[in-house]
Image: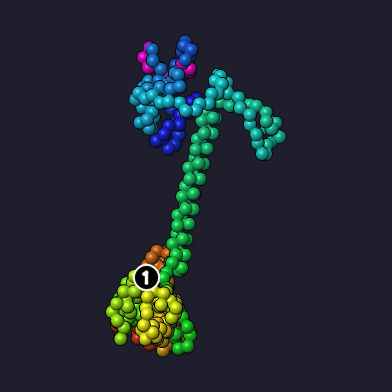
Amino acid sequence: TFSLHLSGISSPAKMKLVDAECKYVIGHYHHVTIGLRFGRRGDLTSEFYTDNGSVYINIEETYERAPFEELNGYHQYLIKEMEVFQVSDEVRVPTRQKSRSPDASEEGEERNVSPVEISDAIDNKWTALKDLDAEIISLENSFTDEEKFISSFVGCSASGIVALNVSGTVMATKRETLLVIDESMLAQQFDDTKWTEHGCKNMRVLEWTPEEVAKWVKKISNIQEDVSNLFQENDINGAELLALNEFGLEKIGVKRAGTICLLLKEIKQLEKASQDVVTLIEHSPYCFGKILDYLRMKYLYSIDLIDNEPALPTVCDDQQKRFAKVVKYYFPGESSSFVLG
């Protein structure tokens, strides 16, 4: 038996005999540099043999064609490593068993093993390896899904989180959750483009670039235009802008005392305006919470993080009328059917 490990071949291949009784399966060359030969082509040439650190392959008559083209036709490969085993008519291997029947061989005792048994054992091992490979791939896919699931909750910038004050009960959710049903009032109210148009960027000062900071300074009344250039030249971003004090303004080149006082006043007002904004929802926290929970599940379903379409909200009897009114307010017309059914 011989086994070849060639670059470009990802799995082992058994070389099957055309005729199991072939007398040319294995033989010797009468030459000091050539080792065992396997198979025979015509009267003189072997299908597989080694010579001076190389292996020569030319499969044709004794062995069936291999599943890889690297083993078919004439090829010569350099040998990097070789293991040599004794070849005999009878194969004897030591066997060890964790548990045995009373008539089984003693542990470590040698017994005769036929080539068929060896072939079956190799096949079983190969099947086990393929099953293990499939299990590893399944685990990798599960890990990818779990990573995506976690990222859907934590992988969100501050601007993507919406804080809500629902009649005194504070709730928070991702903006994508509120946009999941396009026809709803929530989707229109919390559409990011509409927020930007209404000046929402004022609420995201920490994310400002130096260009945005300079643009803001330029809009301040009674501030010379060249002052904004000082902020951009010093690469002052939004977070640094809010941290500036009198000393910091002087360090970036603002010299006039009056200009420094005006800037400090505007920065203080900007910092107050940039604090977390909470949107007031004047409806029942119970009813709105049911709607929000349902939208969360709809969003997870839309990005394939849950398998089944979420069930409609379940509401207690004494809140059903109020719940229906809240739904119809935020989901006018036929869009209410998305929540009420």
Please check the rendered image and state whether residue 5 is part of the magenta-colored stretch, yes or no: no
Please, is residue 277 above or below residue 177 in the view?
below
Q: Which colour scheme is used?
A: rainbow
Residue shown at the point (56%, 19%) measured from the top left: 88
Residue shown at the point (41%, 74%) measured from the top left: 251
Residue density around tag 1, few if under 14, some if 14–19, many if 20 or more, within 10 Å? few
Amino acid residing under circle 1 = Asn
Q: Which of 262 and 334 is in front in this view?
A: 262
* The C terminus, quarter of image: bottom left
Q: Give the range drawn in magenta.
A: 34-43
Q: Can residue 47 be seen in this view?
A: yes
Mark 1 = which residue? Answer: 234
Where in the figure is residue 340, as x and y percent of width and height? 38, 80
Where in the figure is residue 170, as x and y percent of width and height? 47, 83
Q: Can residue 197 be seen in this view?
A: no
Element at label 1: loop
Residue shown at the point (39%, 15%) measured from the top left: 45
The quadrant holding residue 196 is bottom left
Residue shown at the point (33%, 72%) measured from the top left: 232
Q: Which of 261 and 82 is in front in this view?
A: 261
Q: Nearer the viewer, residue 159 or 273?
A: 273
